[in-house]
Image (tube, grey):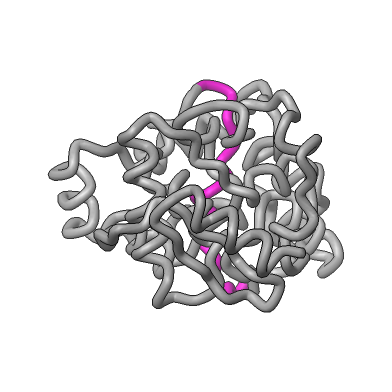
Amino acid sequence: TVPEGWNLDDIGEYLESQGVVNKKDFWGVAGLPHAFSKETEAQKRLKERFPFLNELPPRLSFEGYLFPDTYRIFRSAAAEEVAAKMLDNFQKKLTPDLISEIKRQNKTLFQIITMASLIEKEVPHEEDRAVISGILWKRFELGMGLQVDATISYIKQQSANSKSQSARISIEDTKIDSPYNTYKYRGLPMGPISNPGLSAIRAAIFPKSSPYLYYLSTPEGKTIFSETLEEHNAAKAKYLK
């Protein structure tokens, strides 16, 4: 079982711990986490089999496209077979209706999966996800920094299972020079930071309009919304002491 929000690090480590495949073999097929990597023969074969992967920028991993779910896998399965199973599941979950809606919005699947990966890591509660999606797309369209703490956690390679990520991000962390840093660079990060489930993907496709422009997650996991920076700073002082 691969939980929603796990990244390539988590999946590789888990597959190795279960005695399925060596993590380095898996990364040789799915790409290196947090880094550019030279395209392997296995990746070329998978891109031929799953054309949606050809939208990825060159040398980027398959992060975001390995659908989280429970799989039946033989212990003798090769890394490429495991990745193919997950990619095939992703393809089935992204129905023609969802693909047409993405096209209707003049967005790419890559943009949607990248946004969904942020939503998956930032928002634990499904009811908040569409609102957060609306806030992040609004910031994207206004040319504001997305300022998503989960991107900093990804750069720092913090575990997918760590809680209260916002509480552990320092001002210094937000200055790290990385194309995944949504504090330092405007727009979406270089690519997905996790493998999102259908709930987060649907939230990215169907954002909910709201008057809010800011939000934060309390250490208890509650989402606090604000309309202005002043309100947001007051919420930070109150909830993130």
- Residue 160: x and y in percent read 72, 61
Question: Which picture quadrant has residue 10?
Answer: bottom right
Write the residue at 42% across / 71% down.
Answer: 128
Is residue 67 shown above or below 224?
above
Range covered by the magenta-colored residues? 58-72
Residue 91 in sight from this viewpoint: no
Is residue 154 shown above or below 58?
below
Is residue 206 shown above or below 112?
below
The answer to whether 185 appears left or right of 161 in the picture is left
Write the residue at 81% across / 57% down.
Answer: 13
Asked if the stretch drawn in magenta spans residue 60, the answer is yes
The answer to whether 122 appears left or right of 174 in the picture is left
Residue 229 in sight from this viewpoint: yes
The answer to whether 126 appears left or right of 70 in the picture is left
Write the residue at 86% across / 65% down.
Answer: 17
Q: Quadrant of the C terminus?
A: bottom right
Camera-side residue of 79 and 171? 171
Write the residue at 49% across / 35% down.
Answer: 145
- Residue 77: x and y in percent read 68, 60
Asked if the stretch drawn in magenta spans residue 209, the answer is no
- Residue 98: x and y in percent read 23, 57
- Residue 186: x and y in percent read 49, 28
Is residue 213 shown above or below 61?
below
What secondary structure characterizes most of the magenta part? loop
Q: Quadrant of the N terminus?
A: bottom right
